[in-house]
Image (cartoon, rainbow, N blue to C red):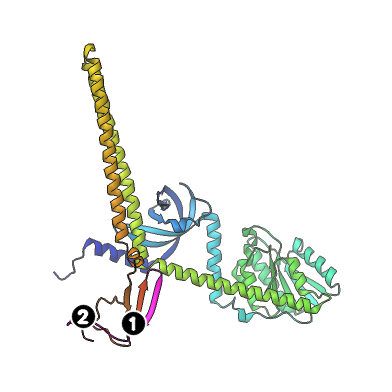
Amino acid sequence: MDQPVFSVSRLTAEVRGLLEQNLGRVWLQGEISNLVRAASGHWYFALKDAGAQVRCAMFRQRNQRVRTPPRDGDAVLVQALVSLYEPRGEFQLVVEQLLPAGEGLLKARFEALKAELAAEGLFDPLRKRPLPEQIRTIGVVTSATGAAIHDILTVLKRRDPGLTVILYPTLVQGAQAAEQIAAAIRTANSRNEVDLLIVGRGGGSAEDLFCFNEAPVVRAIAASRLPVVSAVGHEVDISLADLAADLRAATPSAAAELVSRDRSQDRQRLAQLELRLKAAAGRQLLAHRQHWQQLYLRLQQQEPARKLEQQAQRLDELHSRLSRALHQQLTAQEQRLSSTQRRLQHASPERQLLPLAQRLSELSQRAERALLARQQAASQRFAAACGALQLVSPLATLSRGYAIAFDGASGQVMRSIQGAQVGQPLRTRLADGELLSTVTAVQPLAGDSSSTP
């Protein structure tokens, strides 16, 4: 036979590896059905649409982050790892994020645009420019009838009445808003009549503010020859326009404060430097957070953790099967007991009623004792199965003080000192991390003549 012969276990492991490596993580939208919350805290459900459905598992450490627990029939957006449940050979998704469909689609679109524009270098901190030292004319790109222009004019009149303000009116929400905002920014640059631009609007819903996340607006801000101060929504609202602008202000009023002169120039400069420092620190914090999230996801994909998840899912199945079996046995015993009682009532003479009633009571007690004994034995078998699963866990072995040594170059497990050489790099896996080391000597065990020092 020229073709290799696979075992079932090897085949399912190979298929799971192909799915996870080639498809990896995907976003899906669908409807939840057959939701089961296991006693372990894990969730199991199907995600379906009009044409198909797929089994999903969301483990406890992931579903604890879901703000609103889902229900059957909910439309959701999920990010999941495409995988295979090896014990049954079933294709499934390991869900890592779960969001309501509307909120999730908006967030997914935001993240996709952010990744695309960041790859173009539009958010690079090195592109940021300081505001001009001498500001005489300020351009404002916003709605002519909104609260933002009123707030900006009020602050500028109070702080520096000598400043000139030129409004470049535009829509600030709706389908046409992004193109109009971008066009207004380009118009201000072509006219060259202001020292800087304030681009923004007052607060609103995420949908209202989303035009400031659109690619035309972000690219227009990044391409602007004039320095741009972004002032979109409230302090908690962060838009892609904020990331591309030279300076972000929490609100339109705050933008007017930043670009206007005060009695103390030093205090103004200090405030600007503080905001820039906070913005830089925020970007650094965001970068570090994303880096650690990536490391955490990579760690979740390591084999010991994946095996533990598989074992946890298998344990949930065993618990469910045991509960059903015990319930079926109890129901059968109750039916047999009920049948016996009916036969005794129909067949017994009145003079034998008392002895038969006593016998019936004895049979009932014996049945209850037998059921109790079966339940106790099943519980003991279940506990033993749990203990056996824990004993075979790779993480449990490491937690007892054992370690695994890997060749630092090839990543292969070191099972013997055969082939080890002085100076060879090693990675030693412990329960809570890894140690990096180098072989300084090769020492066989006493009496082992097969090893070479």
Q: Is residue 216 above or below residue 331?
A: below
Residue 226 on the magenta segment = no
Is residue 98 among what the camera can see? yes
Question: 257 or 109, which is in the foreground?
Answer: 257
Is residue 88 among what the camera can see? no
Residue 438 on the magenta segment = yes
Q: What percent of the width, then of the height, locates residue 192?
A: 75, 80
Left or right of residue 441: residue 72: right
**Numbered tag placed on residue 446 in the rendering:** 2
The residue positioned 29% from the left and 35% from the top of the image is 330
Total marks placed? 2
Left or right of residue 146: residue 96: left
**Does dot 2 land on a helix, a strand or a loop?**
loop
**Numbered tag placed on residue 347 in the rendering:** none
| Spatial CA span between label 2 and label 1 | 28 Å
Q: What percent of the width, then of the height, locates residue 239?
A: 62, 67
The quarter holding residue 325 reads: top left
Q: Farthest residue in the front direction?
A: 446
Residue highlighted by disc 1: 409
Q: Quadrant of the C terminus?
A: bottom left
The residue positioned 40% from the left and 55% from the top of the image is 57
Magenta stretch: give its range: 431-452
Q: What percent of the width, then of the height, locates residue 258?
A: 75, 73
